[in-house]
Image (cartoon, coloured by chain):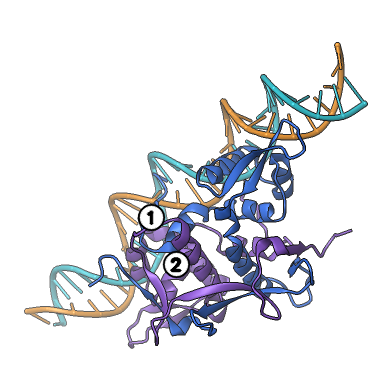
Chain colours: A purple, B blue, C cyan, D orange
DNA sequence: ACCAAATGGTTGCATTATGCAACCAAAAGA
DNA sequence: TCTTTTGGTTGCATAATGCAACCATTTGGT
């Protein structure tokens, strides 16, 4: 493969994000972390991921500041992987993916898990809006390129 | 690799989404499509992707209904790749990734492209809300597992 | 204390995925 | 007509991934 292209230097924030969490497993691990999983074995069992890959991903996600390693909450000797603030801020990404998947990747009537508010059980949605709060479609938006722009 | 695990059968919508668009290049291609690119050469030049990979990804994205192939708009013989409704509905995912990247992957003061409303130039943001419009944090939400649940 | 099992990995090897370069047919331009 | 551009495909080399075997440390049971 010669070395996978890196997008770290790209001026597009989406590209940099994908460079960090765009690989196959990272976002699934983050999803499980949102779901409350913290231990190596929990991730491994729940995702069915190979242990060496999981080991590598947890290390990388930790290095990049998305997860942090903390001592066991129950006094045991093992360590736990927790989301950092940076990791928790991936919440909208997860919700966006979930919303799209619900809409297009399930047959009508097919059951799927749902994201709801804990207190009220209300469904959670996500909306694209302008600064002053108006909902907006892709066609009405435009990407302003900043760097080497004419 | 023996065969990459498929999440098509997963009951979690996020997982299915990642199964479809979670590979390295697909979302970048979709991003460029949002940016108005339509032709093979445009994607190839802009992304710096290998031509065989691009060819494969465009085919896959088309098969899965995210892109569609249409005849040239200017009467030429070549074909163009356009987003379908399914593809356009990935907009919130792109915005979410962009927003996260802006916040965490740029040094203070470092320039990056921006997403704004065409008409007014206003910045575009995305918000996670309940059905009745209240903004909500990850901690206040919970994933309801539907299938083989106790 | 002692043995057994679970936990949290690491290492080696086999298979895929990706990248690069060379090649090619069809279309567009001169 | 000749040349260049476009839109790919094919072959080969390397990187990423998966599986299984192994191992050190904890944990649990007796």
Left or right side of A39 for D8? right
Chain bearing mark 1 = A
Q: How many neighbours does mark 2 have within 10 angstroms: few (below 14), some (14-19), or many (20 or more)?
A: many
Q: Along the polypeptide, which appears first: circle 1 or circle 2?
A: 2
Tell me if residue A97 can be seen.
yes
> How dense is the environment of label 1, judged by Cα within 10 Å: few (below 14), some, or many (20 and up)?
few
For the residues carrying marks 1 and 2, which lies nearer the camera in this image?
1
**Is B78 displayed left or right of B20 in the figure?**
right
The residue at which mark 2 appears reads as A29
| Residue shown at the point (65%, 41%) measured from the top left | B50
Residue B119, by quadrant, is bottom right
Q: Position of residue B73 (x, y in %)?
A: 73, 40
Image position of A135 (left or right of B135): right
Picture layout, residue B82 above or below residue A127: above
Q: Is residue A13 above or below residue A118?
A: above
- Give the quarter of the image for residue C6: bottom left
| Quarter occupied by the C terminus of chain A | bottom right
Residue receiving disc 1: A107
The front one of A142 and A1 is A142
**Rendering quarter of residue A117:** bottom left
Q: Is residue A38 visible?
A: no
């Amino acid at each position: 493969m010669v070395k996978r292209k890196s997008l770290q230097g790209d001026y597009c924030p989406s590209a940099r994000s994908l460079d960090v969490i765009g690989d196959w497993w990272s976002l699934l691990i983050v999803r499980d972390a949102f779901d409350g999983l913290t231990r190596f074995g929990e991730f491994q069992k729940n995702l069915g991921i190979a242990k060496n890959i999981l080991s590598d991903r947890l290390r990388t996600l930790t290095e990049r500041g998305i997860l942090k390693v903390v001592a066991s909450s129950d006094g045991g000797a093992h360590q736990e992987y927790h989301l950092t603030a940076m990791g928790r801020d991936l919440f909208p990404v997860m919700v966006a993916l979930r919303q799209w998947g619900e809409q297009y990747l399930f047959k009508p009537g097919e059951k799927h898990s749902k994201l709801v508010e804990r207190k009220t059980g209300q469904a959670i949605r996500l909306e694209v809006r302008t600064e002053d709060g108006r909902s907006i479609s892709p066609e009405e938006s435009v990407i302003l390129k900043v760097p080497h722009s004419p």
